[in-house]
Image (cartoon, rainbow, N blue to C red):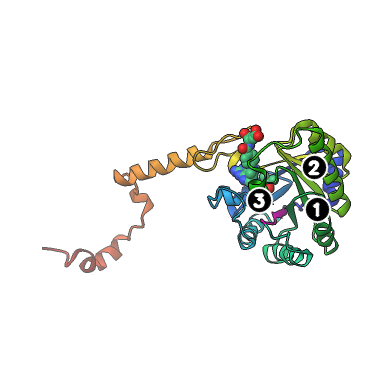
Amino acid sequence: MKQPVTLPRLMAMKRQGNPIAMMTAYDYPSAQLTEEAGVDVILVGDSLGNVVLGYDTTVPVTLEDMIYHTKAVVRGAPHTMVVTDMPFATYRLGKEATLRNAARIMREGGAHAVKLEGGAELAEEVAVLVSAGIPVLAHLGLTPQSVHQIGGYKVQGKDAAEAEKLLADAKALEQAGAFGVVLELVTEPVAAAVTKSLQVPTIGIGAGRGCDGQVLVYHDMIRYGSGIRDKRMVKAYADVGETIRGAIAQYVDEVKNKQFPEARHGFPLDEKAEEAMSTTLYGGGSQ
Ligand SMILES: Nc1nc(=O)c2c([nH]1)NC[C@@H]1CN(c3ccc(C(=O)N[C@@H](CCC(=O)O)C(=O)O)cc3)CN21
Ligand SMILES: CC(C)C(=O)C(=O)O
Ligand SMILES: [Mg+2]
């Protein structure tokens, strides 16, 4: 049976130039299909707030939401490394609270690691988690939990000052013990420079070709949902939204036209049994 990738294996993949393929998944079937397709690492992203729960941002997502979805993903992908996002404000209330919250994601959810959004200011939080045996994936560049502060989903690393800060943050997080860094919406040359400066792998989303791995949101890459807007950073490999809508429309049509169900979808009685209960069924059998 396939074994989940380990942290040393992810480091080796970087050294050997083997790209890491990561995907989000949020429930049992998405996790099953993701594992079967051969993804290296599954992220239970707080993007579930957008794509599963219908919020505008990831800010309303709770620790309970993340644990609930992580449990389903772990059941669906028992042989894949599962990383779960710590949601908004659950790692900013002091080291004790951070550890308690991350421990719940691991113990109750069954995740193998957690991810948190932020730079050098999180170094102590990261170190506390790592010393407790909780692997931490960092997340730099566009950090959607801060969207109200940033003022939109904007590309990061566009000038020398931003590039210096990204490099310094990435270094500090690696130093603190993070096993990798997600780079979101970072200009390609800056993401490549960060990747070169680290020993741990970078996982890009909208961060160009120079990262050690890539991550995409499940619903984006298969267009699962209504009116999934094609973002520049996304490649849609399928349009399952169209497939699902078409299938359901045909079902509705066939129910209305009495084409579904057919005899073969029901459960007949054998002749003897039907005869024996003819009174019950047909009110006496004859008029
Ligand atoms: N469905 C979905 N996919 C995601 O990748 C995702 C979420 N939701 N929710 C949480 C965050 C938010 N993310 C986002 C949201 C918007 C853009 C966006 O509008 N990108 C523009 C480029 C913006 C620019 O040019 O400055 C694009 O067209 O890609 C990118 C990432 C990534 N995450
Ligand atoms: C976009 C990825 C990196 C993420 O954080 C999420 O899906 O929540
Ligand atoms: Mg996230």
Q: Residue 202 carries which label?
A: 2
Which residues lie in the magenta part? 82-88
Mark 2 and mark 3: span between their CA atoms? 17 Å
Ligand 3 is within 8 Å of the C-beta of the residue at disc 1: no
Of residues 90 and 281, the one drawn nearer to the viewer in this rendering: 90
**Is the residue marked by circle 2 packed among few (<14), some (14-19), or many (20+) residues within 10 Å?**
many
At label 2, the amino acid type is Thr
Q: In the visual, does 235 lie left or right of 4?
A: left
Residue 121, which numbered label? 1
Q: Is mark 3 within 8 Å of ligand 2?
A: yes
* Residue drawn 83% across the image and 62% down it: 128
Task: Give the residue displayed 76% in from the left and 56% down from the top.
Answer: 113
The stretch drawn in magenta includes residue 84:
yes
User: Residue 217: which numbered mark, if any?
Assistant: none
Q: Does the magenta stretch include residue 221?
A: no
One can see residue 121 in this view = yes
Q: How far apart are marks 3 and 1 (CA)?
A: 22 Å
Q: What residue type is labelled 1?
A: Glu
> Is tag 3's residue or tag 1's residue first in the polypeptide sequence?
3
Say which mark, if any, is on residue 45: 3
Between the residue at mark 1 and the residue at mark 2, the CA separation in whole angstroms equals 19 Å
